[in-house]
Image (cartoon, rainbow, N blue to C red):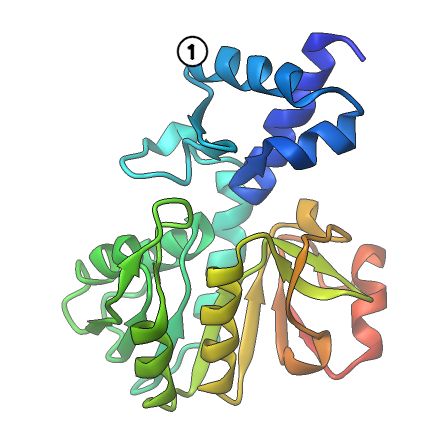
Amino acid sequence: MLKKERQTYIMKQINLHNKVLSSDLSQQLDVSEDTIRRDLNELDEAGKLLKVHGGALSKSFHFPFHQNEVYAQESKRQVALKAINLIKEGMVVLTGGGTTMIEMAKLMPEELDATFFTISPLVALELAEHPRLTVILIGGQLSKNAQINIGARVINDLSEIKVDICFLGANGIDFKEGITDSDWEVVQVKKAMIKSTAKVVILSIAEKLNSVQKMRVCGLNQVTHFITDLDPGSEDLAPFKDGNIQIF
């Protein structure tokens, strides 16, 4: 594989999953980790990603970011608009982090009166711009990679609340493997979030369908709603309709 092809693949993975590990890319592309490190260094120098120890982060996902750096922003906006329709007056809502969640926070109707718990400082700041929303940031150790709060304190605080609906992004989503992620700490927080609600809404652009990360968050049997930028009647979503998931 030519260097240009490798780097195109790397950027595709980082745009979809927000971060990449050199070891994973080495296996996927069948090249040495030294080769991957050189590619990541070049992409970092070109301003396309943020090189970190063991891999790289997406610039669009990392603070501060610019609007024109958000990958598939229009698709994420479509997902966000669908998600907002599930939020009713007076609800208690819990959200994860990520660029789709930030889009949802930006698009929240100004007349909506609701309470939002979130583990994401960036989502909290966007929600705070809406005059009628009560915003509660669940504090803990800030994950520099995921840009959300993680750790035992977050998990403990989540165990103390019961919300009407929870919105989560998906790093990987597959009909057989369910919802997956690449970060152990993030997985533990997402598991705690799922326990705090009866309604679990997964938000994902269609490009993430049939992708699997190393660590399992939950099976699809724990998901009540699934929102993508596709038409609900799309054949790509057919496998997900076999369960009890509502597709939007």
Residue 82 visible (yes or no): no
Q: Is residue 8 left or right of residue 167?
A: right
Q: Which quadrant holds residue 241?
A: bottom right
Q: Position of residue 145 (x, y in %)?
A: 41, 45
Q: Position of residue 187 (x, y in %)?
A: 53, 65
Question: Badge 1, how many Cα within 10 Å: few under 14, some, many 20+?
Answer: few
Quadrant of residue 64 within the rendered picture: top left
Asked if 226 appears above or below 245 in the picture, the reply is: above
Residue flagged by tag 1: what amino acid is it?
A: Glu
Look at 49% across and 31% down and name the residue there: 56
Q: Nearer the viewer, residue 102 or 181?
A: 181
- Could you say where residue 83 lies in the image, as x and y percent from the top left? 49, 67
Determine if residue 230 is in view: yes
Q: In the rendered image of this protein, does residue 35 appear above or below residue 215?
A: above
**Figure quadrant of the C terminus:** bottom right
**Which residue is denoted by mark 1 in the rendering?**
45
**Disc 1 on helix, strand or loop?**
helix
Looking at the rendered image, the quarter that the N terminus falls into is: top right
Tell me where residue 208 appears, x and y as whole percent.
Answer: 67, 49
Compared with 230, 145 (above or below) is above
